[in-house]
Amino acid sequence: MQPRVSFNDFDPVETEDRIRELCGDVRESIAEAILSRKWVVTVPLQLMIKKYQDLLDLFTYWPRNVDNFFITTLNKYAKEQFGDFDHKLAFAFEPPFMVNSYNDLYKYVNRYVGLSGIVVKVSQQSMFLERAVFECHSCLYQWPVDFDMFSLPTIPNKCPHCNKRGTISLRDSDSTLVPIIRGQLNELTALD
């Protein structure tokens, strides 16, 4: 399944308006969370399937890019609708669909999906270098490099701009680290 649109096709202002429409559909859940002093509001992404297909695509295919944007917009909406309240809401997004077989997981790398199983092992949290920004000390050229979780980040041998070797360093302040936890699940199988 391929996304219908590219992440770059989304206009932040228009997308924020669409998220606000979605907020109207979960308004009761937000009000209940505020009144009962709960911290988490569950947003059923299944709501998006018919009415908000563009948002569903955005969230499913680019969850890391949009998660903060969704949560910021949802919190802004809650403050506008219900005034100031003394705690920040967290929003839990129900997965848009469940993966039925672990054999199919390779089809869903970097996508937001749900799994059903028994957690048998969990690693400690570590940091993953998602985007590195490198700088050449000779010509001061800077360029980003995106990494996936399955490759080991390495510093380039030479600058792509001036072709000099050994003058490159990582710009920590401009690079993106993402916290990850690796887990091992045992698949639940039906008994015949």
Image: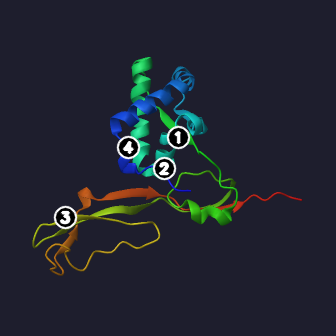
112 and 4: which is toward the camera: 4
Look at mark 2 in the image and give the residue it sits on: 4
Distance from disc 4 to disc 3, alpha carbons, whole Å, reads: 26 Å
> What x and y, as percent, mark residue 144?
27, 63
Look at the picture and state if 118 lies above or below 41. Answer: below
- Which tag, 4 or 2, sits closer to the chain's start? 2
Distance from disc 3 to disc 1, alpha carbons, whole Å, reads: 37 Å
Look at mark 3 in the image and give the residue it sits on: 142
Mark nearest the camera among 4 and 2 is 2
> What x and y, as percent, mark residue 51?
55, 33
Q: Residue at x 58, y 36 (%)?
A: 50
Please state if 55 lies on the left or on the right of 80 as rendered.
right
Judge whether residue 11 can be spotted in this image.
yes
Q: Do the residues labelled 2 and 1 touch (CB within 8 Å)?
A: yes
Look at the picture and state if 3 lies above or below 50. Answer: below
> What x and y, as percent, mark residue 138?
10, 73
In the rendered structure, which amino acid carries the disc numbered 1?
Gln
**Secondary structure under the numbered disc 4 in the rendered image:** loop
In the rendered structure, which amino acid carries the disc numbered 3?
Gln
